[in-house]
Image: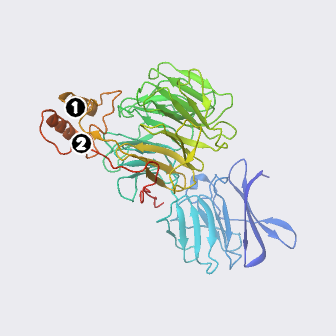
Amino acid sequence: MYQVARVELATTSASNSTVIAFAADYSTRKFAGLYRWSEVTQQWTQLPSSGLVTSASSYPFTIGEQSEYNLVVAVDPRNAQRIWVAGVGAFLSEDGGLTFRSVAKTVHVDWHAIAFSPSDPDHMYAGTDGGLYVSYDAGRTWRAQNNGLAIAQFYPGISVHPSGQWIFGGLQDNQAAYFSGSKVWSNFATMGDGGYTAVNYLDPRIVYVTHAFLNFIERKGSGLATESRSAGISSLDRSGARRPLVMHPLVPTTLYFGTQRLYRTTNEGQYWIPISTDLTLGSGYITTIAIAPSNPNVIYVGTSDGVISRTLDGGITYSQFAFAVSRYFTRIAVNPTNPLHIVATASTFGAPTITQSTDGGATFYSSISSKLAGIPVHTALFLPGTSTMMFGTEFGVIQTVDGGTTWTAGPPGFPNTVVYDLAYVPATTTVVASTYGRGMFAFNVGPSVAVLRGDIDRDGAITAADALLLQQALVGVDLAPLTPYPHGDTNCDRTLDGVDVLLTLRLAVGLPNSSSACVGTVARPGTMEPGRRITVLAN
């Protein structure tokens, strides 16, 4: 006997007395039994279900062992003997549940729904992790029907190149994909679930992505070449399904990665070293990592069991703050100009979901979410040059300009949906928002600020010193507190390279260059740009 967990029911208009139950076992998470209800005996009878595969080793042609996530049963409206069941894959019985065979093998794995057209039962629909599929021949052949559907599910951890021309993100069971200017996204790493991404801001051809439930990181070079880069990360460490990964704001060859410890690599992931002990209360794991843009030695870490840790010296020493009311921290954001001003978001019901500190957590944290009715908050963003703080919540984007005293909804037209990430794009003065189920959006938060290209040190003049600074940035020298982009993009082509160094030198000695000053467009703050919804993935 087994302990019943999830049960799905199905009926059919072909027989008013037919009810089919598809049950799962709580302890094993597997399919446990298929049953038919009898109006005569008023009892359930278990059906033989020969040929129904449940072992995970038979992936993807199996019901699988994740019944709490996907378990489906449906009966043909015209024929009560035709019973569909699905989990990871789909199976069909044409003899009332006596025997089954694997079907629909071209459909994306992880089924969640099966439906029949009322006017033509041969016209079927399937809802899976790959989106919507349709069949016009009673399930013999299927095709994806996702174009134009805003259903892409982005996980936390998108990364946006400073130019806005490249955007990378991990998707729920649809690998990791990138945007490069067109409305067609491209996959760049082979996996199931994509995770956190980090793009090299000097070379967008290099990007890192963590894998859900896996410990390795892949790097995209030319084409779609990838390689695992996890040496030094202990497989015994505790971690969540989506492990946080962030890039140093000034040195793109340095990255940070979280388990229950904080890891760092200084050689593009060739080798990782732990730079902390366990930063949790003993059973949790790191859920968010934030580096202060104005002082990269200041790093904050949040955990799944309600701890915020801070280092002021790049990981040599740490101070910790454990909250009386535990919470799952989803994101920490640092004020771009003040490394001690942070906000931390959480998704735990019954706990403050936005916490703020103006002294780096040294003496206090205060809740600024008392007016938000406890809605889970997933991400935070300080809008540079303003007092605006934006937050991605369970129900869209919200913002405050006065530290949480008053709140307003995000840009007009933005959907009320789960927002996992917000990213500011300086070159276009836009905010990119990724959602879990409605794709990705971009909206203006202008007006733009004039940028003198070539003036790396921001002293209002272009000199040979600027060219030297840019050359140092290109070879990986830390220019803190300066950032090389966008001022170093002297020819305004949205990349930093040797051409920019040469043009900066020309300007320093008085030779003309028409691209020396580029000014972005001006847009009304907080409004959605017409047509600027970035994309909807086909899957």
SS type, badge 2: strand
Give percent across and percent down for residue 381: 49, 40
SS type, badge 1: loop
Q: CA distance from mark 1 to mark 2?
A: 12 Å
What label sits on residue 379 in the rendered view? none
Left/right placement of residue 202 relative to residue 338 reads left
The residue most toward the right is: 41
What label sits on residue 517 in the rendered view? 2
Residue type at tag 2 = Ala
Q: Is residue 514 in view?
A: yes
Q: Residue at x 59, y 58 (%)?
A: 88
| Residue, disc 1 | 461
Give percent across and percent down for residue 447: 38, 46
Q: Is 147 located above or below residue 326 in the figure? A: below
The residue most toward the top is: 317
In the image shown, does 193 or 1 lie closer to the viewer?
Answer: 193
Q: Residue at x 87, y 73 (%)?
A: 40
Residue type at tag 1 = Ala
Q: Confirm or deny contact between disc 1 and disc 2 (CB under 8 A).
A: no
Give percent across and percent down for residue 446: 40, 46
In the image shown, does 133 or 181 lie closer to the viewer?
Answer: 181
Q: Is 14 located above or below residue 292 in the figure? A: below
Q: Residue at x 52, y 31 (%)?
A: 342
Give percent across and percent down for residue 460: 25, 32
Q: Residues within 10 Å of mark 1 (few under 14, many from 20)?
A: some
The figure's colour scheme reads rainbow
**What is the tally of numbered marks visible in this picture?**
2
Q: Is residue 237 in view?
A: no
Q: Residues within 10 Å of mark 2 (few under 14, many from 20)?
A: some
